[in-house]
Image (spheres, rainbow, N blue to C red):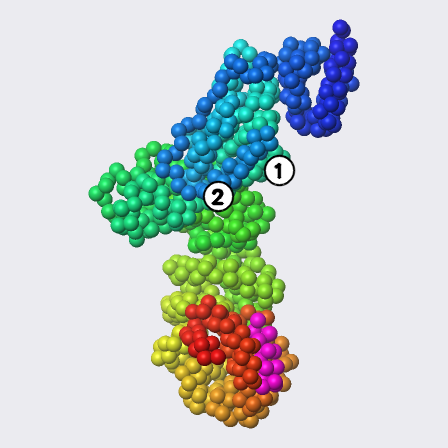
Amino acid sequence: MDGATGGQAFGGVLRSRRIAAGLTQEGLAERAGLGVRTIRDLERGRVRRPHRDSVGLLASALGLTSQAREELARAGGQPPTTPALPDDGAGVPVPRQLPPAIQHFTGRAPALKALTELIGDESATSATVVISAIDGTAGVGKTALALHWAHQVADRFPDGQLYVNLRGFDPGGPPLPPAEAVRGFLDALGVPPGQVPAGLEALTAQYRSLLAGRRVLVVLDNARDAAQARPLLPGSANCLVVVTSRARLLSLVAAEGAVPITLDLLTVDEARELLVRRLGRERVEHEQDAADELIVACAGLPLALNIVAARAASEPTWALADLACQLRDTQSRLDVLNAGDPLSDARAVFSWSYQHLSAPAARMFRLLGGVHPGPGISLPAAASLAAVPLRQARLALDELTTVRLLTEQPPGRFYFHDLLRAYAAEQAQALDNSEVHHAARCRMLDHYLHTTWSAIQVMYPHREPLPLAAPQPGVLPEDLNGDAAVLSWLDAEYPVLLAATAMAADARLDTYAWQLPLALAEFFSRRGHWEAFAATQGTALAAAQRLADPRAQASAHIHLGVAYGFLGAYDRAATHLDTALDLYRQLGDRMGEVSTATRFAHLLGLQGRNREARDHARRALALCRDEGQPRVFANRLADVGWFNALMGDYHQALADCQQALEIIRGLGDRLSHSAVLHTLGYVHHHLGHHEQAVCFYEQALRLTIEIGDRHRQATTLVDLGDTHHAWGDTGTARQCWQQALAIFTTLNHPDADAVRGKLSCA
């Protein structure tokens, strides 16, 4: 037939086969990896002699039998594009390419179960499985899991098992080209070299044709990305593919329906079992504390644990405590985690991921390890750290999470484990100078200081301003709206803010080292973090003394007095308050004296010394009476009312608090408002006005919940329970006390014992 007639014949056969397969032109184009325009031209006979690679791709995409393939090839003027296989598979090699399973494999029960469930009914298996490592971590055991499972289920794939290391992250050279990998598979499947076509499309078509109807397990190890793995995916629903990669292969999940299985670091129990299998139960249990220290030092990373276990196994007389001692120094830890070759050297394995990074991502990685104290960082904080816009920071962080050098959990918050942090710090030390680190550290501290201060101002709009210097160029403080957003941010950043305060002190960045604790004072008090409150104010005091700043010193002393008072260290608290009072008098700061006298009153009240406490409260009231600050005056009047109530002078207390309430209602100060309502509830309770007491207590409770002051919330619940109990409602009283006990227990507060006593007697 002539060319035109041949093209029309091919188009007719192709169109009929496509319709029989239930495919549109677009669907066939997608399956075959060809353009829709190409499919249309072929069906309309516009292509006189279709290329044999295209014929092979189309035959594979249509799932044609050997006879139908020959018909399509002949219609296109081509010989069959792939060798026809006997229908029964007779004489076709059965490849067994799996490397040996990893000895001492431990844990991973959920992942193994998920993989096995993917096999299901042999007639229905069609899943492609992606195993990706959390934290991107090299050494998390992706290959070990894949091979362990593959050997377990090999007998369920009677037509063979194919394996290839794609070298996506490998020190030995570039990633393996997909065409080379396919040629290796064709060789394993018995295709003579002379029948192996040229070009990736033709290779893939022949590979898929050979696997059609066969039940084969394919393990694609260490893929660089989805593009490298995709040509190696069989078209047969009877095959199952396991792909391991440090990268998140989201494209395979989205386009091919792959099922992602994410590997985390080993749990403590799994890590301990790994050591037991390598070293014997007796040795591990004999030095259980040292074994646990090794697990922590290795961050639960299987590679690191296996290196340590290998060292211990090769020296059976060594104590595990000696190994643990060697790993304590984070600067030399990676030196110890080296068993002598690149595959068993944690530093080298991490480097294979780092070396593939773009320059912005590599810089972000170094800053996170060399400057940021951890444990986690938000996107805005990372942008400030690197002095880049949010979008650029997001791109760098996404790249790091894609190759699992970071993990994002929860969304918008990024972490890496301690060994990767140590490696990042090494790279920062080697590649960045001290000026780079100093500038990034100041930007980071500016971010946290300015965001914290603006957050506290949302909760305490009446707080005296803190004179902050302008943030460094490139800093993007976060804009938080509403108490819920503020408390959520502060709770999430709490460990970071503690670490940042310590870092500022260590680096002798003393302005940050006293201002950051001052900005956090109300949060620590509101959440009941008394020990952290005391520790950070101690840091602030030392910094203020180095700066020779008496006002900063007075601030730190007064907050130390508050913290130690709540910790029950009353003498230390009084000493700090005395010092603060002297400093404020030297400065001529009358409102500082008012604040100190107020703190003295509260401290004495905690000790039950109510008469002395009232004297200090009256002194504070007298000092501020003529200062023209109605909010401060109302609060000090409420303090006097509270101590009058504690001393049994209920009618005077009622008068004091009603006057204070009239002023506070118009100021929008919810914290002060809740305190006055609480005192009014206490007064009415002791006057026998139980219904009024409950009303005031419930109003106060709502406000403490709104502002997130857990300590005041618990105290109000205790007193509300007392009122219900006195009113004869024991059930409601117990509910209030139980809620209070839960809060006090969380805060590790000594008042929990008193509440337990109430519950046991009620």
Q: Nearer the viewer, residue 619 or 682?
A: 682
Residue 479 location, x and y as percent? Answer: 59, 60
Q: Vertically, is 711 above or below 620?
A: above
Label 2: state its secondary structure: helix
Residue most extreme to the top = 1
Residue matched to label 1: 254
Residue 504: which quarter of the image? Answer: bottom left
Instruction: Look at 39% across and 29% down and name the residue there.
Output: 100
Determine which of the numbered discs, if any, sits on residue 110 in the image. Answer: 2
Stretch in magenta: 690-705
Give the image location of residue 636, x and y in percent.
52, 85
175 or 554: nearer the viewer? 175
> Is residue 127 left or right of 555 when viewed as pictured?
right
For the N terminus, the image quarter is: top right
Query: Whole-percent x and y of residue 310?
Result: 30, 38
Percent coordinates x, y for residue 21 in the rendering: 71, 24
What secondary structure is marked by label 1?
helix
Above or below residue 256? Residue 211 is above
Residue 628, compared with residue 564, is above or below; it is: below
Badge 2 or badge 1: first in the primary sequence: 2
Q: Tell me the CA gap for discs 2 and 1.
A: 23 Å
Residue 214 visible in the picture: yes
Instruction: Name the residue at 49% across, 92% down.
Output: 648
Q: Nearer the viewer, residue 700 or 152?
A: 152
Looking at numbered disc 2 in the image, what kind of residue is underneath it?
Answer: Pro
